[in-house]
Image (cartoon, rainbow, N blue to C red):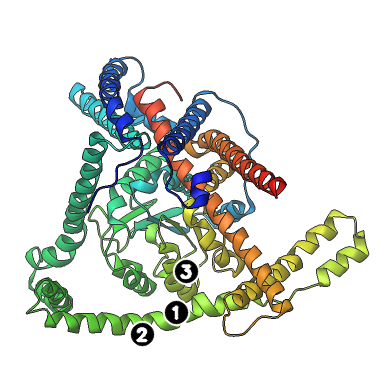
Amino acid sequence: MAAAEKGTPPTAAEVRRLHAVRRMIFLLLAVAVVAAVIVPFKLPGKPSSLARTVFEDLESLPQGSSVLLSFDFDPTAKGELEPMGIALLRHCFARNLHPVVMTFWQSGVALHKTMVERTAAEYGKVSGRDFVFLGFKPGDVNLILNMGESITGAFDKDYYGRPTQGMPALAGLNSLRTLSYAVCLAAGMTTEVWIAYGGDRFGFPLAAGCTAVIAPDLFPYLQSGQLRGLLGGLRGAADYELLVGTPGEATRGMRPQSVAHLFILGLIALANAEVFAAFLKKRRRF
Amino acid sequence: MKATPTPGADRAGSRAPLERIVGLVLVVAFVAVSVFVSLPRGTPATDALVKEAGGTAPSDHQQAPSPAERLRRQCGVILAAGLTLIIYSFLYRDNALFKIVENLYVGIGLGYGAIMTWYLSLKPEVVDPFLQAADRGDLLDAVRLRSVPILLGCMLVTRISKRFSWPSRYAYALMIGWGAGIGIPITVHTFVLKQLEAAIRPIGLQGLAEAWSSAGMFSTAFWSALAAPAGVLLILVGTVSVLYYFFFSVERGPLGRAVSKIGVIFLMISFGASFGYTVMGRISLLIDRVQFLLTVWLGVAR
């Protein structure tokens, strides 16, 4: 903007133009996403190596092993993490693993309960025998440390109020030290808490799934081996759905996601071209 | 202080009646579309939501919902669709409906949080162990194990009074002391030592040399073997140069400036990756809402 460059406030015409451009971008983005949702087309999908590691780790576990799933998100991150959680649950149920589901986010309990019950019903799995839904318990790091001593001591009852002591789904799982595998699906920084107070301290293999926004913060833990694998955002969820062989909401979301990304790349290129043209024009003037 | 007139305020004033009419038409259109799509025809909307998620609809497992239940679900879907559209209306301009829904969201969030705190934290951990103790032994256990934590919790609440806030200091002192004692060694181990270890790994050229001698330089095996040492080198260079960029105590010569510039390049790439992921995250949320509107509310996509 010429006025902005001179340090003067923008004129009314410039403000109107900016508003118009902003609204046009929103409108075009909405049209692109809606069109990509309605019009079906196929995209080549190749799961990332990070998702494949999580999948192969779960594949390598013997049947009946307990897998801790910490669903640390609430409905605000449903779009990205619900498909991921459902794909993980489906994988566990299909392989006769015993998912032990808990959360540190009390505002997400209702969503997690629906996810677990619905997916369990698909596979005819019974609560307490094939899976455990522990729900929420306050305590944060204290709870993890407590689980490191005894799972049934930390959660004496499951979400439905049944005693966890002697539950078939928890057979052989005394504490986090005997845990076969854990996956933390987080919309916040709970993964780092699980790494520090769980995986590093008690030595169980830990993987993570997260919203796209926090994925870059977790890459250093892959390099150091503190995380086995990482499912990042909707793409991570789609990767896992493809690996499990149950394409769902995330896989369908890849169509509008790709179109929206292309659109944004185009806008970035256009804006850079404008800046470059202005630069050339200025250079010619001198 | 004299208010500065907003540029284009006059034009906005003249546009207001037209915008009101358009807004009213949109509200009427929303109601009409909602009524139309709610008429009984084929798969219920709520089942479509489940099937969209790749799952099995409740109706596949359970008996069909009663008319009252169906009406309740449809009202829920229409309400959710309306609230979604009102929230997105902010992209055009801030408006009264958006303000109402924004406050509604905050209010519901707080109310829901309070209820969940009561049912998932306070009731099962503080109230029930005392009031629903099965026998004298359970009651004594509750008194023995929970009295001190409950007392400390109550001491924290005294912060609301300026005069009687001193007991809260003891509770905070305990929390800070415990937190530091547990947290410092774990933090140093997890976030410093482990990360340092990952940054100074041996480059490991043995695999590369083997690939060179067995398959030659232009083979896939060679380039695959090159990835690991190149990654280790890249991380080492990135870590050192970025740390050097934030090192302000020494005047930099030409070499120092070059290292610093490399650090800036690494930082820029990192910011770019973060921005890309952020865009992906925001678009994912938009897609979730669009899928809800098109699949569950309108039923035009599967």
Picture coordinates of residue B173 (x, y %)?
Answer: 24, 84
> Is B153 displayed left or right of A124 in the figure?
left
Local packing at callout 3 (Cα closer than 10 Å; few below 14, some 14-19, many 20+) is many
Of the pair B45 and A132, the residue shown nearer to us: B45
Q: Identify residue type, mark 3.
A: Ile
> Is A267 displayed left or right of B162 in the figure?
right
What's the distance in space between the residues labelled 2 and 1, CA to CA?
9 Å
Q: Residue at x 16, y 79 (%)?
A: B168
What's the distance in space between the residues labelled 2 and 3, CA to CA?
18 Å
Q: Identify residue type, mark 1.
A: Ile
Q: Residue at x 50, y 68 (%)?
A: A204
**Image marks 2 and 1: residues in contact by CB distance under 8 Å:** no
Q: Identify residue type, mark 2.
A: Gly
Q: Which mark is residue B181?
A: 2
Of the pair A44 and A99, the residue shown nearer to us: A44
Label 2 residue SS: helix
Q: Residue at x 51, y 54 (%)?
A: A63
Label 3 residue SS: helix
Tell if the residue under mark 2 belongs to the same chain as the one under mark 3: no
